[in-house]
Image (cartoon, rainbow, N blue to C red):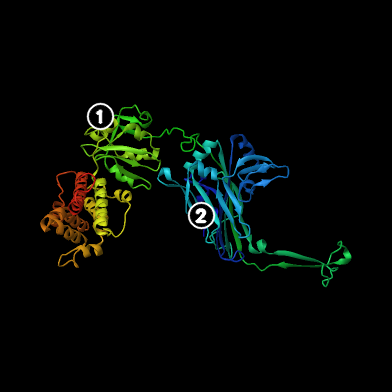
Amino acid sequence: MNEEWILQKKETRRPFSTATWVPLRASVTDEKGDVEEVGFVGDVFACGSVAFPPEHRELVEERLGWSDIGTGHDVAPYAYKDGYYATIDQYQYNDKQPIGVNLVFEHPQPVVGGRLWILHPDLVVALRLIKEGTEWVRPEENFVVVAREILDARGRHRLIEIKREFLLDYLAARNLSLRLSSYRQRVENVSSLEGSEYGNLKEHEEERDGGRYQLLVRSLNDVFGGGWAMMRVSRTDVDEDQDAPVMGPETDANTELESSQGHRSGYEGVRVEGEFWRDEWIDHQSQSIRVRGDADTNLPQFIVETDGKRMASADLTDEDIGRWLWFRSSVVNELLGNRGFSLDWYSAQTGGILSTSGLKTHFGINSSDLITVYASDIARLEPWEQRIWAAHNVVPEGGVSSELLASQVKAQPASTHSVESKLFDSMRMLEAGFRKTHGISLFTHDIDDEAVMQHVTRFVSRDQASLLRLAKELVRAFSDRLNVRELRKLAVHDDKEKLGSNKLLQDVLAQKVGAEKARRVFAEIAGTYDMRLGDAHPTGSKVTDAIKLAGIDQNLSYMKQGEQLIHNFGRAVWFTGKFLFEQPAGPKP
């Protein structure tokens, strides 16, 4: 350790009132060595907090400090004999005089031992948090971590802290300010002050950084040595042989007194100790967007005209705004990359994105591969979601999606189906046909269509590499799940023991329609499979041949190529079911 470490100037110059994370309660002690011997190093940070309304601010500043608000103050409920009950969240200045709110509770564990810290349930519910492990997250904001606890190796609490942004929102809703009282201590025992890192330091006390610092330099003998005394008082009038002995009043005649005293010394070395105390306020900014529902004054603007004209989100909230917004299709991938988001298809070119806020954003794809959304649908989203959309906002081009207009303006929703939904419908119908006709499971395991559809989507295709990855996802969803063992029983090919899943299914189809027709049906599945193999090496003639075999027009945009890949693959699955089990129900791909 060194002089900078013991003086703690780097740590004390950073107040929590401007920090990202604010400790609500802390008791962090890190020690190395024996406290009574040279070589010992100790580092302590402790903190307590109470939230107060503005009418008690002056009293708090004048009367309350570390001993009143720090970790030594009792956080517990209390029942008075007259019927008054002080709840655990009440901070009382005097008996029955609550003036503040505890945000972290202490819960002693009777019998089993230990002591738990509990984050105020009102704060948890008001901010709509859920606890995952040692973290409290807010699902409505992409599961952002709002508060967290740190435990030691024995499971004891060391720290509970909260992000200041969310704390201020809660404090504003309740019109409270948080008073923090913190203490820092650093200690090192050295053999001698001279020649050590602290040789130039002298004991002193100073006011700095809104707090008080004190440096103590004492010999270990002064700290741990000194005189001691012991007394033992015992009774002499108890008959131990009696079954139910009773002691009488205590007198000098029936008591004995023994006493001893001595002096402890011999502690060698010097204890260098730096301590810092600070009381500070965490004040809200009179805005509570999450808890009270105040308007967010920092919402983004969106491009609404072909000349780049922008309008503030707050001006787009009216359902009668009569405007649409345009976005790059990449916005869908970014949104789906967030936990809790999902994609649902309504028609061939329209769908909805469900977010963790519970809102579903209805979108359409236009002729320029842009995502179009009615403006008020974006303006009503959570602020953080709006900022994601705003990052992909572009100048209008290609008009509003025709199918979106059909739904939102003409009230005649399109009767078309997306290639994604038709693919999964076709797989389900083919599976049902094998179960009904052959009494077998076509696939070795089931999948969650909705979950897999988040990866098997045209939006994934942004370039050739991502197009090849889409092919891999298609193969995983279909070919890799085919029940090779059961298909081998149905196959009649001479080399069926060597054939893979696709070839076995093709052989089963060939028994019904002939080898050539089966080959044509499976051509696009085979091409997709070869594209999957090209994912590791996305260049060369083999990849080009595979893309061509999959029936993809490389003159199209990559998103349309992705759509075509899914369409062709799904169509091959649909025709397989049609030829094997006659016309299946459902729309033809």
The residue that disc 2 covers is 150
Image coords of residue 130 (percent x, y): 47, 47
User: Mark 2 and mark 1 in contact (Cβ < 8 Å)?
Assistant: no
Amino acid at dot 1: Asp
Which is more toward the observer, 66 or 579?
579
Image coords of residue 314 (percent x, y): 38, 30
Q: Residues under labels 1 and 2: Cα distance? A: 53 Å
Mark 1 burial class by Cα count in 10 Å: few <14, some 14-19, many 20+: few
Mark 2 burial class by Cα count in 10 Å: few <14, some 14-19, many 20+: some
Up/down of 262 relative to 433, above or below: below
Amino acid at dot 2: Ile
Image coords of residue 436 (percent x, y): 26, 55
Q: Which residue in the rendered view is the most extreme toward the right?
A: 253
Which is more toward the observer, 221 or 290?
290
User: Which residue is located at x 21 percent, y 37 percent?
Assistant: 368
User: Which circle marks residue 377 in the picture?
Assistant: none
| Between discs 1 and 2, the one toward the N terminus | 2
Up/down of 483 relative to 318, above or below: below
Q: In the drawing, does residue 290 fall left or right of residue 481?
A: right
Question: SS for tag 2?
Answer: strand
Image coords of residue 36 (percent x, y): 62, 65
Q: Would residue 459 be visible to someone looking at this image?
A: no
Q: Would residue 350 be visible to someone looking at this image?
A: yes
Which is more toward the observer, 45 or 311?
311
Q: In the drawing, does residue 506 fall left or right of residue 253?
A: left
The residue that disc 1 covers is 307
Q: In the drawing, does residue 109 fall left or right of residue 1?
A: right
The image shows a total of numbered marks equal to 2
Question: SS for tag 1?
Answer: loop
User: Which residue is located at x 82 percent, y 70 percent?
Assistant: 243
In the rendered image, the quadrant that contains the C terminus is top left
